[in-house]
Image (spheres, grey):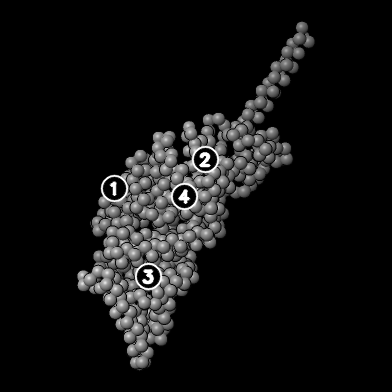
Amino acid sequence: MNGSILGALLVVALLAAYLVWKMRTAGKRSAVRTDPEPVPTAAPQELTGAPATTPESPPVRDDAEAATPLTETEMPSVDAGSEGKPAPLADELAGLSKSESDEDEPAPVAAPVFSDRDKTQPTAESPENLAAQPLAAAIAPEEPIAAAPQAGLGAPTILLSLDAYASRMNDLEERQRTLLGQAIADRDEGLRDRLQRELVVMNDRLALIADSHAEEVACLQRVLDTLMQLRRESETPPALEGAVAGLCGGNAGSAEACLAEWGGQPPAMAGKVAFCRGQLAECRVDLQQALTQYRQAVALEPDDSCCLQAAGRVARTLYNYKEAIPWLESLVHLARKSSADDPLALALAQRELAYTYVLAGQHQKAGPLYKESMTALARKLGQDHHELATCWFQIGELQETLGEYDKAVSLYRKALAIVEKQKGAEHPALAAILDKLAALCTELEMETEAVSLYERLVRIQEKTLRPSHLQLAISLNSLGESYRLVGRYGEAESCYQKILTIHEATYGPDHPSVAAVLQELAKLHGNLRRPEEARQYQERAAAIFQKSVEAQQKKGGEESLTLEL
C-alpha cells in the first residue's frame, strides 16, 4: 500500500514538473511568434541575449518606417523654446544631438534582463532556429500576412539609383520645356498654364534631388506592396513579373497597366488601387491624371488621410482651391479625432489647410490655424526645427501678399536662420527662401543685401542644377540686375554672358529670348563706356526681333504681331 502511494506521488510530481516545463516553453514560444514586425521588446532578447531585431525582420520595412512621422509615444516632449530637436520626420535628423539620438533609440542589449542560462542556452524557439523555418511558421495564425503588407514579405525592393532618377527628371524637364514652347507658339493658354505648373514641380524636385529621390523610392515601394497584396487577394491575379521588374528599376509603366487592368477587383481594394495610380501619375508629374485618380480614391475612401492629403496638395498645385480646401478640411477633421494619439499629424494638417487658405485669398481663416499649428510644433519639436522654418516662410508669403513687406522680410530671415543652422549656409533647401528674401530686398531698395542673397542662390543652383537649366538663368538674371543696381557692371556682364550661353543652347541663336539678353548686354556696355560693343549687341538683338516679327506675319497675318518673350 505504502509502495503504491509513493509510486502515485512520484507520478504526480513528474506530471507537475512536465506541465510546468510545458507552460514555460509555451510562454517563450508565444513571445517569439506573436510579433510579425521587429519590436524592441524583451521577449526575443530573453531567449538569446541578442538584439531585438530578428532574422525575419524585413530590412526594407525598417527603411520605410524611418521615412514616416513618429507618433507621440516615440518622441520626447519638448517645450516651446527648447533647444532639443527630436526627429518627427526621418529625412530631417541632422539637428539631433548625439545624446538625444541615443535616447530615442532602443538599447541594443538589455543586459540586466538576461540570466547567464538565457544567454548561453538558446531554446528550440530562438531566432537562430526560427531562421531556418518558413516565415509563416513564425507568425501566429491570428496574424495573417495580408493584414500588414510590407516589402519584406517575399517582395523585391526598389533599386532606383539617385543618378538614374536625376537623369530621368532632367530629361522630363527638358521635354516639358519643349512642350511649353510649343503651347506658347500655338497660343494654347490652358495647356500652357498646366505645363508651367508642372514645370514648377519638376524644378523643385531637381533643386532638392536627394529628398525627391527618397520620396519617389518610397512611393514606388508602396505601389509594389499594393501589387503584392492584390496578387494575394485577387481570385485571378495576372502575371506581375514585368510590373515588378519595371518598378524595381524606377519604370512604372507595366505597374500602371496592371493596376488599370485590376480596376475595382476586389472591390475592397479599389480605393487603394486608385490612390496608387494617382501616386504613379504624380511621380511622372502628370498632375491632371493624378488629380483624377485621387478624386476616385477619396470617393471610395473618404476617411483615408493619405488620400485626402494627396488630393488636396495636387489640387492646390493646380490652383483648384475649390476642391483642395474641402479635402484638407476633412483631413484636419480626421486628425482632430486622433489628436491625442498623434498631435503632430494634426499640427501638420492644420498647416496644410492654412497655407491653402493663404493661396486662395482666405487670409482670415489662415491665422488661427497657423497659431494652433505652430504652438503644437514648437512644443513638440522646439522652435528651431525645420517645420517651424516652413511655417515662418509661409507666413512671410502671407505678409508679403498683404503688403506688410518689413514683416515679411523679418519672417523670411527667421526661416533662413533656422535652415542655415540645421543644414548649412549653402544647402539646396535654402534656395526658395533666398529667392523670396532677395527679391523683396530688391523691392525695398536694400540692394547690397539682395546681391549677397542672390550670390548664394546662384552658388547653390550651380551645384544642384545642370549648367543649361533655365532656372539657373533666371537666378543669374536677378543677380546681374542686382549687380547693375549697385554699379558692379563688370560682374553683371559676366552674369548676362552666362545667361546668353544658356539661352543659345536651349533656344538657338535667333530666338527672341536671346535678343532680350543681348539688349541687356548692350545697356551694360553703355554703362561701361564701350559704345562699339554696345552697338554690336543692339544691332544683333534688333535683327533677331525683326526676323521674329516677319515669321509671325507669315504665320498669322497682322493680328499675330505680338511676341511671346
Residue 91 place in picture, x, y as percent: 49, 56
Amino acid type of the residue tagged 1 in the rendering: Pro
Question: Is mark 4 in CB contact (under 8 Å) with mark 1?
Answer: no
Q: Earlier in the sequence, mark 4 or mark 1?
A: 4
User: Residue beneath label 4, please?
Assistant: 253
Question: Could you tell me how far apart the alpha carbons at marks 3 and 2 are, in whole angstroms?
Answer: 49 Å
User: Residue beneath label 2, please?
Assistant: 239
Q: Is residue 377 visible?
A: no
Amino acid type of the residue tagged 2 in the rendering: Ala
- Label 4 secondary element: helix
Q: Quadrant of residue 137?
A: top right
Q: In the image shown, does 127 or 50 lie closer to the viewer?
A: 127
Question: Is mark 4 in CB contact (under 8 Å) with mark 2?
Answer: no
| 243 with respect to 500 (left or right) | right
The residue at the point 55 percent across, 53 percent down is: 159
Question: Could you tell me how far apart the alpha carbons at marks 4 and 2 are, in whole angstroms?
Answer: 14 Å
- Label 2 secondary element: loop
Amino acid type of the residue tagged 4 in the rendering: Gly
Q: Residues within 10 Å of mark 2 (few under 14, many from 20)?
A: few
User: Residue beneath label 3, please?
Assistant: 435
Q: Quadrant of the N terminus?
A: top right
- Of badges 1 and 2, the one in the foreground is 2
Q: In the image shown, does 251 or 488 lie closer to the viewer?
A: 251
Q: Quadrant of the C terminus?
A: bottom left
- Label 3 secondary element: helix
Question: Could you tell me how far apart the alpha carbons at marks 1 and 2 are, in whole angstroms?
Answer: 39 Å
Q: Earlier in the sequence, mark 1 or mark 2?
A: 2
Q: Residues within 10 Å of mark 1 (few under 14, many from 20)?
A: some
User: Residue beneath label 1, please?
Assistant: 326
